[in-house]
Image (cartoon, helix red, strand yellow):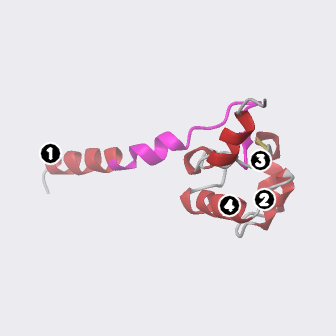
Amino acid sequence: MSALAKALLLAAALLAAAPALAAKKALPPGERIDLNRATVTELMRLPGVGEKRAQAIVAHRTKQPFRRAEDVLAVKGLGPAWFTRVKANVQVGGAPAAPAAAATASAPKR
């Protein structure tokens, strides 16, 4: 294999990995991610959370929104050691509002 071919293969591999690397930007100190509202990409910014674990978090909260940050430990693959590392970067707000409920809640009362 020529040097040019190797360089092209390396460049192609780096381009293919770019979206995953971009999504894995480290969280700056003090930034918090809401476990009930974050997208899969946002959840992937947490240490130790890849796409599958982020999807598992979203699937769990769809069935049962988190009431406390510690409730995320019910998701398979997330344990106490992981939670100790990320607890400063996670929070739990309200569950995402359904579109119809949000529209009703913001309608003026007469």
Number of the front mark, 3 or 1: 3
Amino acid type, callout 4: Thr
The CA distance from mark 4 to mark 1 is 49 Å
**C-beta proximity under 8 Å, tags 4 and 2:** no
- Mark 3 lies on a secondary structure that is helix
Residue 96 lies, in percent from the top left, at: 70, 47
The CA distance from mark 3 to mark 2 is 11 Å
Quadrant of the rendered image containing residue 45: top right
Amino acid type, callout 1: Leu
Q: Quadrant of the C terminus?
A: top right
| Residue 46 visible within the image | no
Number of the front mark, 3 or 2: 2
Which class describes the residues within 10 Å of circle 1: few (<14), some (14-19), or many (20+)?
A: few
Q: Which residue is mark 1?
A: 4
Look at 75% across and 49% down and name the residue there: 95
Mark sitting earlier along the chain (4/2): 4
Q: Which residue is mark 4?
A: 62
Q: Which residue appears farthest toward the bottom when viewing the image?
A: 76
Residue 4 lies, in percent from the top left, at: 14, 45
Q: Which mark is residue 72?
A: 2
Q: Which residues are magenta?
A: 16-36
- Mark 4 lies on a secondary structure that is helix
Q: Is residue 23 magenta?
A: yes
